[in-house]
Image (cartoon, grey):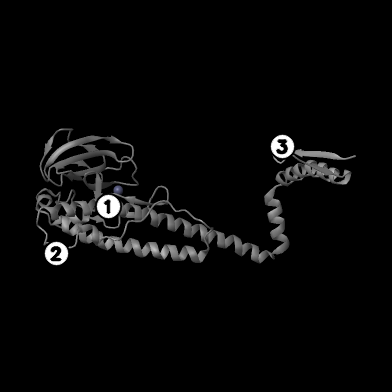
Amino acid sequence: MNIILVSNKMAKAKSLSVFQAGMLVAALVLVPVLLTLLFITPKSNIKEQGMKALLPPHLKSSIISSQVHLDAYAKELGELQARMMRLDAQSQRLAKLAGEKDKQGTAPSNQKPADSLLPANRGGPLINAHPMTETDLQAAILELTQAVDARDDSLSGLEAKILQQSVLKDMLPNSSPINAAFNSSSYGWRIDPFNGNKAFHEGLDFTANTGTPIRAAADGIVSAAERASDYGNIVKIEHGSGLETRYAHASKLLVHVGERVVKGQVVAEVGSTGRSTGPHLHYEIRLNGNALDPRRYLKN
Ligand SMILES: [Zn+2]
């Protein structure tokens, strides 16, 4: 018996022997069965059995511990990338502000434009073309740490420039909102006390007893006096030119929306409402909605 196969395209006939036809049928039937078996069999078992067969137990445990190392590095790298992205956004805002000042003719003409003070922008999601080794990760973390440090330096310079602007200088909320010491490491990147992850904390925390008076840091108009889930009882004051201060976790609010307040006026009392671990004032200064480092303003 011969099976004749005809290809439409080539219009060319091929004849197969009984043996060849048998092999073809066997292949067509067996291949799907084999593939099905391969997928049904748990892969982890094959992998694990393979590893067990190949590796002594002490090597197996060292592979698991190096995976733990890699996970820790990957987490560190992710946090650094988040820092970089935040710095990128901040540097763009500051460069714009400094650039506007330059346009007013207050800067010498031979001065470099503000943008050139900054390293090229980086950031964005991490996309790995290949699985990273521990050495790759160490190198990437080192590179990012250096970039973050460099960016921090250039931002400090730009920020100092902006502080010297007379328009802001006159309106800066520069008086302390409370008669208490602040926790200087509270502003910036820190371990979140609630979930243990590194996060940017946008305010400065002053530890004080419940009921301690909270005072307006500058003249302004109350834009909010309300209860929020994270901030707890909060007062927000607008000072003009996009400057705003926020006073959070209060036990008592003593002002209402639309009220005009003067520098030093008591607007609320310290408490521990909202996302708070104990009585303290969480104080923020924002410029066009973006958090500024309050320590720089309190020094003035
Ligand atoms: Zn806080």
Label 3 vs label 1, nearer the camera: 3
Considering depth in this image, is 3 or 101 the residue closer to the camera?
3
| Quadrant of the snapshot with the C terminus | bottom left
Distance of label 3 from label 1 (alpha carbons): 66 Å
Considering depth in this image, is 79 or 61 the residue closer to the camera?
79
| Quadrant of the snapshot with the N terminus | top right
Q: Which residue is at a point 51% across and 64% down the rendered structure image?
A: 134
Distance of label 3 from label 2 (alpha carbons): 77 Å
Distance of label 1 from label 2 (alpha carbons): 25 Å
* Residue at disc 2, secondary structure: loop
Number of other residues with Cα within 10 Å of mark 2, as a class: few under 14, some 14 to 19, many 20 or more: few
User: Which residue is label 1 attached to?
Assistant: 90
Amino acid identity at mark 3: Asn
User: Which residue is label 2 attached to?
Assistant: 110
User: Which residue is label 3 attached to?
Assistant: 8
Number of other residues with Cα within 10 Å of mark 3, as a class: few under 14, some 14 to 19, many 20 or more: few
User: Would you say the residues marked 1 and 2 are in contact, meaning their CB atoms lie under 8 Å apart?
Assistant: no
Label 3 vs label 2, nearer the camera: 3
